């Protein structure tokens, strides 16, 4: 089961990065990516339950699946509210669901902090001029387009905050 969980985690990281790249390129996050991430979470949940000694704790503990689902639903509701006030796009609101599922209840505070910090950094970076030697490159041309439109692809910031949150336990373990 641990190998299956590792494969699912790797696939989910790839899909999160693809969602960020798609949002950067098109200002859209396809429903298929969000649904695939939710399906991967469900597969991971089955693998965790099958490999667990205490199924009740795996399902209903705040650090278990119950906390993950609670975090996902809370973040999805928050995303829908932000979308209703036209502060977010619909794709960003929907992406909050799988992010909440993967980050879980105990990852909400670090995720929120990282989202705030990365959001502020993104807004500051968008104020900087693009250096002329690289202004012709597609990536920097897209940054200029984002700056001119004043539409920020928040999915990029959300994904990087989520991935950093998921990496924090591994980073802490390496520092010990």
Image (tube, rainbow, N blue to C red):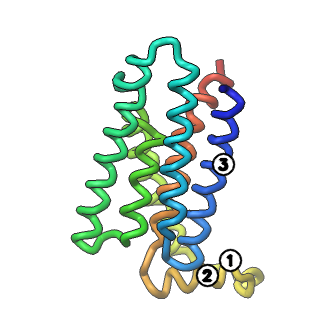
Tell me how far mark 1 sits from mark 3, CA to CA.
25 Å
Q: Foreground mark, 2 or 3? A: 3
Q: Residue furthest top?
A: 53
Seen from the viewer's position, the closer of residues 40 and 67 is 40
x then y, percent, for residue 107: 43, 36
Q: Which residue is mark 3?
A: 11
Q: The C terminus appears in which quarter of the rendering?
A: top right
Label whose residue precedes the other's in the sequence (2 or 3): 3
Q: Are marks 1 and 3 in contact (CB under 8 Å)?
A: no
Residue at screen point 53% across, 18% down: 52
Note whether residue 116 is visible.
Answer: no
Q: Is residue 139 above or below residue 114?
A: below
Q: Which residue is mark 1?
A: 139
Mark 2, secondary structure of its residue:
helix
Dot 3: within a 10 Å radius of its alpha carbon, few (fewer than 14), some, or many (20 or more) residues? some
Seen from the viewer's position, the closer of residues 146 and 92 is 92
Q: Is residue 58 left or right of residue 169?
A: left
Q: The N terminus appears in which quarter of the rendering?
A: top right
Seen from the viewer's position, the closer of residues 122 and 66 is 66
Q: Are marks 1 and 2 in contact (CB under 8 Å)?
A: yes
Residue at screen point 35% across, 31% down: 66
Tell me how far mark 1 sits from mark 2, CA to CA.
5 Å
x then y, percent, for residue 10: 68, 44
Q: Quadrant of residue 56 in the image?
A: top left
Q: Quadrant of residue 44 in the image?
A: top right
Q: Foreground mark, 1 or 3? A: 3
Q: Residue furthest right?
A: 133
Please give the label number shown on residue 78. Answer: none
Q: Which residue is mark 2?
A: 142
Label whose residue precedes the other's in the sequence (1 or 3): 3
Mark 1, secondary structure of its residue:
helix
């Amino acid at each position: 089961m641990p190998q299956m969980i590792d494969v699912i985690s790797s696939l989910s990281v790839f899909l999160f990065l693809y969602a960020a790249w798609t949002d950067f390129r098109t200002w859209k996050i396809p429903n298929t990516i969000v649904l695939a991430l939710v399906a991967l979470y469900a597969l991971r949940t089955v693998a965790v339950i099958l490999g667990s000694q205490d199924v009740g704790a795996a399902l209903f503990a705040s650090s278990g699946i119950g906390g993950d689902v609670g975090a996902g639903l809370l973040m999805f509701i928050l995303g829908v509210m932000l979308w209703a006030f036209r502060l977010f796009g619909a794709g960003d609101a929907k992406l909050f669901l799988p992010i909440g599922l993967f980050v879980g209840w105990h990852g909400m505070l670090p995720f929120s902090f990282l989202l705030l910090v990365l959001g502020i950094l993104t807004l500051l970076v968008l104020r900087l001029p693009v250096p002329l030697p690289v202004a012709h490159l597609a990536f920097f041309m897209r940054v200029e387009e984002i700056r001119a439109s004043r539409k920020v692809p928040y999915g990029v910031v959300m994904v990087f905050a989520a991935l950093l949150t998921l990496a924090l336990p591994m980073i802490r373990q390496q520092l010990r």
